[in-house]
Image (spheres, rainbow, N blue to C red):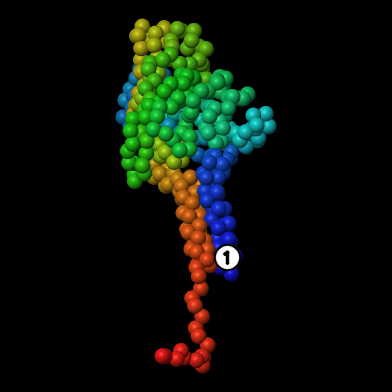
């Protein structure tokens, strides 16, 4: 019985020891992915911002500007692209909606972002766009890869339609969560006017005829939870200007929007709670279960060897039969 039990334990030990690296290096890269039907929204606020009044074409201080960002997964589009891409794909339809203190629209820029569900690398397919303009993204946008590294990444900027490095600046603690802090500076760049303007009758084409151009710069900051690759907080020091042309009445430039855009407090709390939950799920596949199975395999191996050693130990001598004759002394 001991020999049989030791063989069973040895088989179990080999199974769990082999399962440990398989779970980490084979199962995790295939199981960890962004759901194709994911929906999320976020509200950011710029307090004491500067905003252009298109009626007077003068910049003025306003108590707040609100930015609502939504990302909605298009499952049907993802499945269609997967048939030709040969991998799991997520299609996010994004919208960045900016409104002034009166609730009226300041700008509205839609996006379609197509990426690999596992690695978050862009997947180039028909429909990839920003504000109706076809783009070919390079680098990440919105989310970092699972198991984010302490290094710089390439990050796509929707305003300029360009990719620039976003730099790792150090490790911090944010609301009890260990995070990597990243920062990107986009220098002043000439950018397209939004297709949808805040004043009826004004179009990008009509503004272009006046010779006026739109320029933009930002300092983008993210605090990213490295296990999930999800930002728990973000902000931008955002500036936009209109420059030149007859629309400005002889002025060289006017501020269209300037403000420090930060996540609203209720969305910070919700995001941190969600990231903590998802972090536990990822750690189950990358740390808890692999190390647990390895430790269990070692324990079972030790137990099997112990039982085998017991089975091989010589048995104790048998006691003499009752009534056996005593040796006669001389």
Pick out the residue farthest to the bottom: 323
Residue 310 vertical position relative to residue 279 in the rendered view, above or below: below
> In the rendered image, which quarter is residue 43 located in?
top left
Horizontal and vertical percent position of residue 108? 49, 26
Estimate the x, y position of residue 101 in percent, counting from the top left: 38, 31
In which quadrant will I find the C terminus?
A: bottom left
The image quadrant of residue 250 is top left
Dot 1, how many residues are within 10 Å of its Cα: few (below 14), some (14-19), or many (20+)?
some
Residue 314 in view of the camera: yes
Q: Is residue 129 left or right of residue 64?
A: right
Residue 57 appears in the figure:
no
Q: Is residue 80 left or right of residue 297?
A: right
Residue 49's x, y, as percent?
Answer: 33, 27
Q: Nearer the viewer, residue 184 or 284?
A: 284
User: Vertically, is 245 above or below 174?
Assistant: above
Q: Residue at x 53, y 23 (%)?
A: 137
Does residue 35 sit above or below 318 in this rendering? Answer: above
The kind of secondary structure element at disc 1 is helix
Q: Residue at x 33, y 33 (%)?
A: 170
**Which residue, given by chain and number where applicable, does mark 1 sit on?**
3
Q: Position of residue 313 (x, y in %)?
A: 50, 68
């Amino acid at each position: 019985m001991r020999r049989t039990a030791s063989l069973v334990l040895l088989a179990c030990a080999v199974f769990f020891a082999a399962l440990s690296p398989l779970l980490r290096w084979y199962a995790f890269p295939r199981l960890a992915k962004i759901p194709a039907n994911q929906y999320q929204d976020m509200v950011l606020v710029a307090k004491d911002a500067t905003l252009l009044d298109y009626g007077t074409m003068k910049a003025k201080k306003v108590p707040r500007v609100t930015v609502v960002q939504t990302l909605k997964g298009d499952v049907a589009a993802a499945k269609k692209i997967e048939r030709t891409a040969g991998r799991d794909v997520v299609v996010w339809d994004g919208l960045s909606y900016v409104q002034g203190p009166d609730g009226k629209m300041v700008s509205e820029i839609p996006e379609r972002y197509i990426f690999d569900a596992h690695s978050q690398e862009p997947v180039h397919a028909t429909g990839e766009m920003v504000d109706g303009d076809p783009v070919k993204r390079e680098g990440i946008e919105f989310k970092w890869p699972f198991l984010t590294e302490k290094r710089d990444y390439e990050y796509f900027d929707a305003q300029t339609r360009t990719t620039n490095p976003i730099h790792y600046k150090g490790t911090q603690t944010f609301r009890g969560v260990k995070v990597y802090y990243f920062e990107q500076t986009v220098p002043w760049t000439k950018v397209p006017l939004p297709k949808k303007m805040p004043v009826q009758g004004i179009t990008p084409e009509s503004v272009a005829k006046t010779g006026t151009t739109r320029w933009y710069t930002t300092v983008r900051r993210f605090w990213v939870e490295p296990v999930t690759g999800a930002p728990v907080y973000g902000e931008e020091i955002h500036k936009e200007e209109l420059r030149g042309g007859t629309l400005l009445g002889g002025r060289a430039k006017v501020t269209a929007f300037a403000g420090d855009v930060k996540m609203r407090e209720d969305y910070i709390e919700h995001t941190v709670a969600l990231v903590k939950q998802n972090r536990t799920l990822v750690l189950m596949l990358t740390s808890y279960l692999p190390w647990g199975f390895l430790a269990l395999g070692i324990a079972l191996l030790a137990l099997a060897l112990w039982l085998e050693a017991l089975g091989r130990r010589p048995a104790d001598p048998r006691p003499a039969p009752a009534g056996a004759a005593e040796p006669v002394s001389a």
